[in-house]
Image: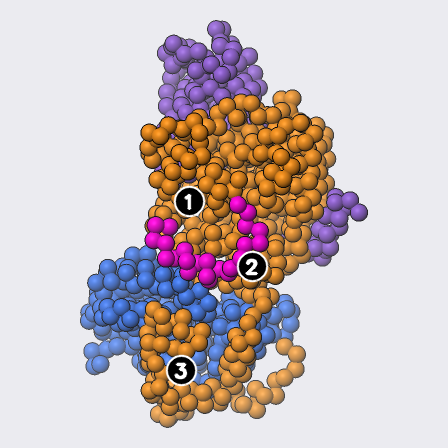
Amino acid sequence: MRVALFVTCVNDTLFPGTGKAVVSLLRRLGCDVDFPAAQTCCGQMHVNTGYRAEGTRLARHFTEVFAGYDAVVAPSGSCAAMVREQYPKLVEPGSRGAAAIAEVAPKVYELSEFLIDVLKKEDVGAYFPHRVTYHPTCHSLRGLRLGDRPTRLLQNVRGLELVPLPGAEECCGFGGTFAVKNPAVSAAMAADKTRGIQDTGAEVLCAADNSCLMHIGGTLRRQKTGVRTMHLAEILASTEDD
Amino acid sequence: MSAREEILSRIRKAVGGAEDVEIPRGYRTERQVDDLVGLFAERVDDYRAIVHVVPSAEVPAMIDACVKGKRMVIPEGFGRDGGWDDLRTADGVLTNCAVAIAETGTIVLDHGPGQGTRAQTLVPDYHLCVVWADQIVPGVPEAVARLDPSRPLTWISGPSATSDIELNRVEGVHGPRTLEVVIST
Amino acid sequence: MSATFIGMPGNFPENAAKAVQNSQLRFNLRKATHTIRDRRASVVGELPDWQELRAAGKAIKDHTLRNLERYLLRMEEAVTRAGGTVHWARDADEANRIVTDLVKATGETEVVKVKSMATQEIGLNEALAEHGIAAYETDLAELIVQLGDDFPSHILVPAIHRNRSEIREIFLDRMPEVSPDLTDDPPALTEAARLHLRERFLRSKVAISGANFMIAETGTLVVLESEGNGRMCLSLPETLISVVGIEKLLPSWRDLEVFLQLLPRSSTGERMNPYTSMWTGAVEGQEFHLVLLDNGRTDVLADEVGRQALRCIRCSACLNVCPVYERAGGHAYGSVYPGPIGAILTPQLRGMGSELDASLPFASSLCGACYDVCPVAIDIPEVLVDLRAKAPHAAAERAGMKVAGWILNDHERLAKAQRAATKLRRLVPKRRLPGPLSAWTDTRDVPEIPEESFRDWWERTGRGERSGGPTEEGLRGASEEW
């Protein structure tokens, strides 16, 4: 199976460790992982901020870069949801763009979907002896409908104690440019989210999206809580050798 | 152009060429409920109304007990004498209903014989309604099918209530503060 | 007289920032929205066919909107046949004029009102007041808002922002008959409202309402309520005037079997609301007028993406689950339609000419909770994103997004930008970013820029030897229409 990693622009630039974790995890599970170098960004920030033309250009670039792979794996529920849910709305039905999207979009998987639905793995052989709570992130929960896939994976990690997060389904307040355009509400949402996280007594907050983790983690660090944030891929890639 | 013509022409322009939509009706239109009377009584009770389930022969005695000492408005066609005429000074109103819904604990008045006018069932502070077991249907679709839209209809689910102050439910605002339902089996 | 939203200054972010500071308001809203949210979830969970009802509700509304002309004409004919009179109003002014003239013709100077979003939208009370006609709101929450010279802040519970002691103060101040011993116990406050309105109900000759639904097939109007003030207004006065948006139509009587399950469970979180009144034309000797209101609705109808907002049945489930509404409160939206539905309805009805209206499509983190609970499946995030593309953008933002788009459209430019950022990483202040980005660092630390991007790591470590992506030549050649 030719698997392409869509690392996403945020991970590529700010969280390379997540991309490395996906590569190591997928190779450990026997996948032939490629990183198409021409990839950039899914275009979500532009489209969701009202810059549809720029966003559509990036969508086109995406479909060209990732055409021809059996599967495209993204360590981001939000970017995967962008491709699968929003790309079709950017083009006229019946156009060349629509055909290109229909070809590529169904092969784009968020990491936990790929592991569970395609590789049929719930136990990926990971070891992570820490108390962890999981924030499901909006686009994973209500866009992709990941359900309990990520927590099933976490429950199979040896040594890991998974504690439920109160109000887990509530948005953390990131919302892309929302965090900058509506800073007061965004910060109030983050404050409520971090209170919930601290109440769990977890050492690590895990999610399938680094953009949400950047927002929550930035707040946790400012509050000097000592709670770390980690992407799902990084926990799943951890082994007893680490 | 008249307002009517202009609005209609704007609509034509707005939806011209839009595809029509099929209506999927995959929801339940007939449901099986084993104990209709029991479910209806339970659901009415959930609204903090008073419920009695009695055999038909005992209904007159039950009504007597409920209305004792009260000045009751008794609408035409109810088949009981001794009603009080002045709405403003009446203590309550005694009616039948057109249909009742088990799943939602609702009684529906179509203001036909024995059900009074809309004002008669509204102004007095106490409403006593007699429901016959065969008037109870399982759900909303079955009730809608039984009702005649050309009649004024009042659907009643419990006593009047409000949650406008800090979402605290308070029974009894402008409508009858007490609803009592006698189910005749 | 309650205040009107029309022409309200400011913008959503500033309004919301003030509201967030009000801890009493946040406490009231959190408690209230979470209570209704949980109630809704519980009664919706009771119905095994909820998704089927939702699909039917969505399709019935879409079908009606696509055949709106036919169904409006059928409605007009049915109401007329049943002894009612139908009026058509292009906009707020026309609707207000029609209603004012109808009231004047009765010789009355007082009217009682049933809670109605449409009449708030057109500012009817203020228009009547200009002609010496006093309109008395009779819904408890509307009464609290009206007596307090306040703005409504929620579709279903307009005084959701007020707590019991504030309500007691308003009643003591504005109800002359009320005893100074009035407590702030909700039953006591409710009793005060009951007594305050009782005589008015019994003597009023004219009532004004809206409607939740109109049935084209039969000419029936439907009003759902809880308190009985609706029944008082709809059945006691000699003249009844109903102002109803043209999108409130349903084709057939049978369609109520869907909406009478969807609406109560979504709005108050009850299996059924206490009272629903249905009437067809002039009933029990009453005179009945129906005013069909456009006021921007046909513009919304013309927008292929935005028209789904016209499916809205004003249940307010979207407000009750919205994390932004919960913290910003209803007033921040500057409209009778607050919350997620307001963020897509107001800019479409009023346009985005004012700073406030142009800021509304951005008043959402696009979390999607609103879409999940909407009983007629309005994809609110989809409409928000569509409106954002139509909204005016600041020049600096446009320039920034253009540069970002240019960089992101080419991986070599992206790689160069990443390397430049890496070189400057020690210079990036963690706790204070410049310009509009300072909004981020007010409450959050900035993540550290790594020493090396993922793509540089991949390249450097030679892990890309199995690369099979398209060549750059191939990409650059693809420039025809897409």
Q: Is residue A63 visible to the viewer in this orientation of the structure? A: no
Q: Which residue is mark 3?
A: A13
Residue A134 image point, x, y percent: 30, 64
- Residue drawn at x 56%, y 23% as measured from the top left: C203
At mark 2, the secondary structure is helix
Q: CA distance from mark 1 to mark 2?
A: 23 Å
Give C10 or A52, whichever is nearer the viewer: C10
Where C458 falls versus C297 (above or below)?
below
User: Are the residues at dot 3 and dot 1 in contact (C-beta closer than 8 Å)?
Assistant: no
Q: Which residue is mark 1?
A: C160
Magenta-highlighted residues: C3-25
The chain containing the residue under callout 2 comes to: C
The image quarter in which residue A101 lies: bottom right
Chain depicted in purple: B
Amino acid carrying mark 2 in the image: Asp
- Residue drawn at x 44%, y 21% as measured from the top left: B125
Residue C148 image point, x, y percent: 46, 41
